[in-house]
Amino acid sequence: MLGKIALEEHFATEETIGDSQPYAPAASWPELRSRLLDIVDRRVREMDANGVELMLLSLNSPAVQAIPHAAKAVDLARRANDFLAEEIAKRPDRFRGFAALPMQHPEAAAEELRRAVVELGFVGALVNGFSELDENGTTSHYDTEDHRPFWAEVERLEVPFYLHPRNPLRQDARVYGDHDWLLGPAWAFGHETAVHALRLIGSGLFDAHPGVRIVLGHLGENLPYGLWRLDNHNAWHGQRASGYRARRPVADYILRNFLITTSGNFTTQALLSAIMSLGSDRILFSTDWPFENVDHAAHWFDAASISETDRLKIGRTNALREFRLGG
Ligand code: GRE
Ligand code: ZN
């Protein structure tokens, strides 16, 4: 399929690239590094070869979220967003931007989002999970009261917020024991991100701000598969299981407030399951370049056993609508 739009596509700056090194075996680091630092050369060739018209670009993970000092996080986010805007200006026909945000400081994050959308023309935010607040392992997730003004701004600006994975801190990862193979994209990324998304839902955020849209990668970080069980269990308690502060069942919010992408999860079984639980209007194509290959994503998606109507929605038109890319 030509004209695909891809949403979870990363780059790095010299300052943030070290954050991605732990994920690459030494032998493949030079390749990953050069892929992350490139924006308009190799990347455009990959897009041309695989029918990808547009990529929405985002900073690598965890970058801004791992800076245990709010003022430094604010500064890095601003500089990364300015850099990205300059790169996009070289090929505005092929790229748009997601803002990196210093969520350590919710008011500054709201301000930076507004600046990125209004002044830089960015189409949303991509945030790498929880933020580190200090060197002692204090973290913040975004379901707490102090983040409500931030979400009000997201709602006002009418732009999607991509909740992208990061690893839990070591001290919060004891459940994995010495099974380091479960960290990162294999399992921990999805678990961390799914729990954060459920915390947003359970906090009642989407009752207070029904216009907020959250994007999850990797076909929804396994959430579509778990919806029935979540809500079935909640129903034992009349929708108000302990700590559940939202008005409606989890699935209602997933269907109204969430979008999911195919990033790094190129399997038709899971895609069909997601289509059956969410519908094809809420699923969007993505590759997860440079951690995955654009050709792997595109060859799989272009040939997947779905209707051509769904392929066009997932590959392109859902993104045009949700990100107002029509021009
Ligand atoms: C990502 O950001 O998508 C990512 C990483 C590290 C490994 C795999 C991966 O940051 O998909
Ligand atoms: Zn990613």
Image (cartoon, helix red, strand yellow):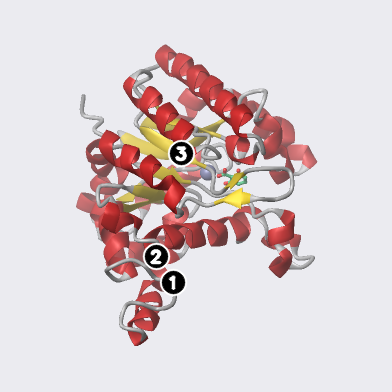
Q: Nearer the viewer, mark 3 or mark 1?
A: 1
Q: Which residue is mark 1?
A: 243
* Amino acid type for the residue under numbered disc 1: Gly
The dot on residue 126 is 3
To which residue does mark 2 refer?
202
Marks 3 and 1 sit apart, C-alpha to C-alpha, by 27 Å
Q: Quadrant of residue 115?
A: top left
Closer to us: 130 or 128:
130
Give the amino acid type for the residue marked by disc 3 in the picture.
Leu
Dot placed on the residue nearer the N-terminal end, 2 or 3: 3
Residue 168: x %, y % from top left: 65, 55
Q: Tell me whether the residue at label 3 lies in contact with that at label 1, contact meaning CB atoms closer than 8 angstroms.
A: no
Locate residue 146 relative to residue 213 in the image: left or right. Answer: right
Q: Position of residue 54 (x, y in %)?
A: 36, 30
Q: Name the mark on residue 199.
A: none
Is 1 left, or right, of 140 in this rendering? left
